[in-house]
Image (cartoon, rainbow, N blue to C red):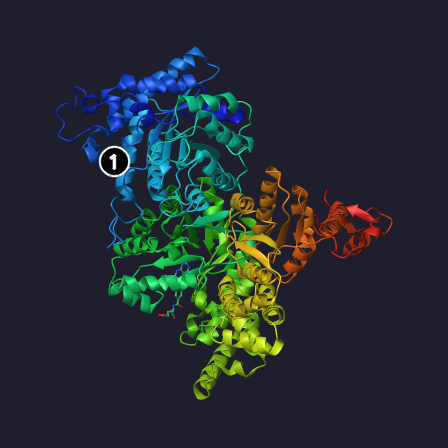
Amino acid sequence: MANIYDQLESRILLLDGGFGTMVQQYGLAEEDYRGERFREWPSLLKGCNDLLALTRPEAVREIHVKYLQAGADIIETDSFNANAVSLADYGLETYAYEISRAAAAAARSAADEFTARNPQKPRFVAGSMGPTNRTASMSADVGNPAAREVTFAQLAEAYTDQARGLLDGGADILLVETIFDTLNAKAALYAIDALAEKLGRTIPVMASGTLADASGRTLSGQTVEAFCTSLSHARLLSLGLNCAYGAKQLLPYLERLAETAPFRISAHPNAGLPNVMGGYDETPEMFAEDVGEYMRRGLVNIVGGCCGTTPAHIFELSKIACNYAPRPLPAPRRVTTLSGLEPLRIAPETNFVNVGERINVAGSAKFARLIREGNYEEALSVARAQVDAGAQIVDVCMDDGMIDGVEAMRTFLNLMASEPEIARVPTMIDSSKWEVLAAGLEVTQGKAVVNSISLKEGEAEFLRRAREIHRFGAAAVVMLFDERGQADTCERKIEVASRAYRLLTDAGFPAEDIIFDPNVLAVATGIPEHDGYAKAFIDATRWIKENLPHAKVSGGVSNLSFAFRGNNAVREAMHSAFLYHAIRAGMDMGIVNPQLVKIYSEIEPELLQRVEDVILCCRADAAERLTEYAQQVRATAQTEPQAPDAWRAGTLAERIDYAMLKGVADFIEQDALEGYEALGTPMAVIDTLLMPAMERVGTLFGEGKMFLPQVVKTARVMKRAVAALTPYIELGSAQSPQHNAGKVLIATVKGDVHDIGKNIVAVVMACNGYEIKDLGVMVESQRIVDEAVAWGADCICLSGLITPSLDEMTHVCEELERRALRLPVIIGGATTSDLHTAVKIAPVYSGLVIHSPNASRNSQILAQLLGPDGRLYADKVRADQQALRSDYQRAERTRNLIPIVEVRKACKDIPAHEPVVPLHPGRMVFPDFDIADAEPYIDWSF
Ligand code: THG
């Protein structure tokens, strides 16, 4: 039989269209649905289209034939609701298997007939598996957010039955579709994977999500990227989107999916948006035009239609699909990616990922009390505070002798799921009991981390759990423990890590889903054997990162300082210094209290010295010396408590610096206004006081001396300062006479939420007489262009702080180019630069793209651009950019070249007359070398 994978190599395959619309044309009545067999059935059956597979099989087959005639390569079985959960509405739950099998058989016979007629075009049957009519990750009961109307286990059981029926009836593929709740889909994929294992065969699976109308997210709240991440464990034939929108409205989301998904992509949208009567108006031609755009952009491998589409729609697609190449399957990225409602990538540029530790009954007396008392409301606020303080993942632990762990884990995770600010981030499910871990996995729609598994109970149990975790779509913390116990020396850690890595990867567990925890153990405990623990962790981390590709390293940082419980100053210094060194060695994430992460460079030097002696195990009396110091600190702290506001005595600049660095917002309005009094203009306060402090924070972050939670706090302080100054900026504009200088549209691009810079720029431009339309943050390229055109903007300003924003800005310009627009674009934000703008952005767009180095410059740029000499200005910008590009290209050509004198210096033993062979490929040229003396270079790139 023809292989669907082979077919997908060479062409875009066509799926069929809507089934319900076709059934409607038969005008079936209650008796038709019932047939002979269900004549006496106690409830009404009209509308139960799945039942037609049993009572009207010839009609079902006829619909399939029409789609096959239209050119469909894959037809979907009439089994969308043929599962016990949905069929319960009709009391038909026990018929799920039989209906599914009959539905597949009807499609199979129609498909085989067409394949036999033309074996060059083999036809395939996809067993349709809908989302059911219940949701596993939301509560239907407003009064009880922890309640669920269906469980993972119930769904998995129902889907197993349906999948068996579909396969027995002859389906080639299973299509888990119209996913509105990712947890339901995970249950389906779980069931299918277990079934495949039992049957000893592989089952090609297509999955397709649907987005809730307004938000561009699934009904259960996930972004397209988070949705994709949650399903990335399954070896899907394809992942796609269907229903919800018309083809045009689906395009931006499909683009996002195609950017993220390591799978082939499918799309089967509706025939437009529903009209007032709930019908669909898009003609086959309009539909094909919009779906054709997916193909033109190389986004898809499988296309078809959903609600409102007919064989005529599919026929239109069949005329054009052969003109386009399928989307090539991207190479696997191997980046550890987790998700809550939003995705989290753990990549080198993420710096360090904070896992909030306080939602732990064993690690926080307060949290334990709240859970024991059943005060879940306040317990949730602990989680919220962790996320607010910058936790990018939350560790949840309910291991306590007095608590029912399974029940508490399930209830708490269900409650967290109903709080969008908390559910935004992925969960780390922390327990030493497998039942608790499994209970957590069953209620989590995102891609979670299981904390933890180890070789403690031997290889078989370790692998059994790992397989199960993977089937649930989670990553795993692997503690470096084995049958002999905890690995405490570097050698033991390496031994256990390499063994676990080999076992897991041999069993097909993705290496990027392995997060090693080399055991952070308490140091300076007075027991000399413990002295080397921190250093052993750091050394093992370095080895793991160098030798076990794609795996990550994490650890519970607060364990380190248990010997200093009660002395937070010393504990925080220890954590901060430890992180500084461990991150340098490659530690990717850590369980910490993000509310208390201190800045490395702020540790008092004497204390730092003693702490580092302990951590790096530098001297035999290190522990003793730190303990001695700790006692002193405590003594002074007790005798003369330092006034917490002592920093208020500094100069204005010092105070603002302090507030920004420490994230203290209490006095910032007052200080900002004092700055305004002193300097005369609000912009002077921003440019000379706030921005420099902000930049210092950025630098410390870049050097790994500050972490995200602290930067988040700084941003809040900055926002409040700017808010305090805004009325004065606006006052300035009211006084300035000119108005209607031009219309400027401004937005922070997709993927980025930073808007401080953007807001300042917007206010300043408004003050200079420009009319501003601010689209906010995370704005799709398509929407930016749509709105700019609709509003008649004279210029677009794009803002972004983080590196991925750079690519996104390029996308906006590509979109402008595609639509043959020539609106000028101004680029701004921390990672943007003249060079990047000239080399990467400007070349994709025929309109002018200008980089603005700071907030106050935009108005000057606009004045020149939109002024009488705009053309001259544009020419100059283009010429400058051309010069930058040429320099860059020249530097690129010699990028891997290194001055021969430097190589000679590095390889002293090589006699001067012998040719030098480079020994260390990958070393960089020196940033300031002069191209003019590029002569004596050797090729370093091999
Ligand atoms: N590795 C992995 N998981 C872990 C750990 C680890 N999970 C648990 C723990 N270790 C990490 N979490 C904490 C949480 C709190 C504290 C330490 C580690 C802590 N708590 C205060 C104390 O004990 O002094 C309690 C203070 C209070 O009651 O408020 O230090 O290593 N994979």
Q: Could you tell me which quadrant the C terminus lies in?
A: top right
- The residue at the far right in this view is 913
Q: Is mark 1 on a helix, strand or loop?
A: helix
Image coords of residue 821 (percent x, y): 62, 41
Q: Could you tell me which quadrant the N terminus lies in?
A: top left
Estimate how packed mark 1 is, as few (under 14), some (14 to 19) or many (20 or more) residues with alpha carbons within 10 Å: many
Image coords of residue 599 (percent x, y): 53, 69
At label 1, the amino acid type is Ser
**Residue 899 shown left or right of residue 158 in the figure:** right
Image coords of residue 241 (percent x, y): 43, 36
Vertical comparison of 337 with 262: above or below: below
Image coords of residue 598 (percent x, y): 50, 70
Q: Name the residue under label 1.
A: 86
**Residue 217 shown left or right of residue 166 in the figure:** right
**Residue 913 shown left or right of residue 625 in the figure:** right
Front residue (pair 397, 7): 7
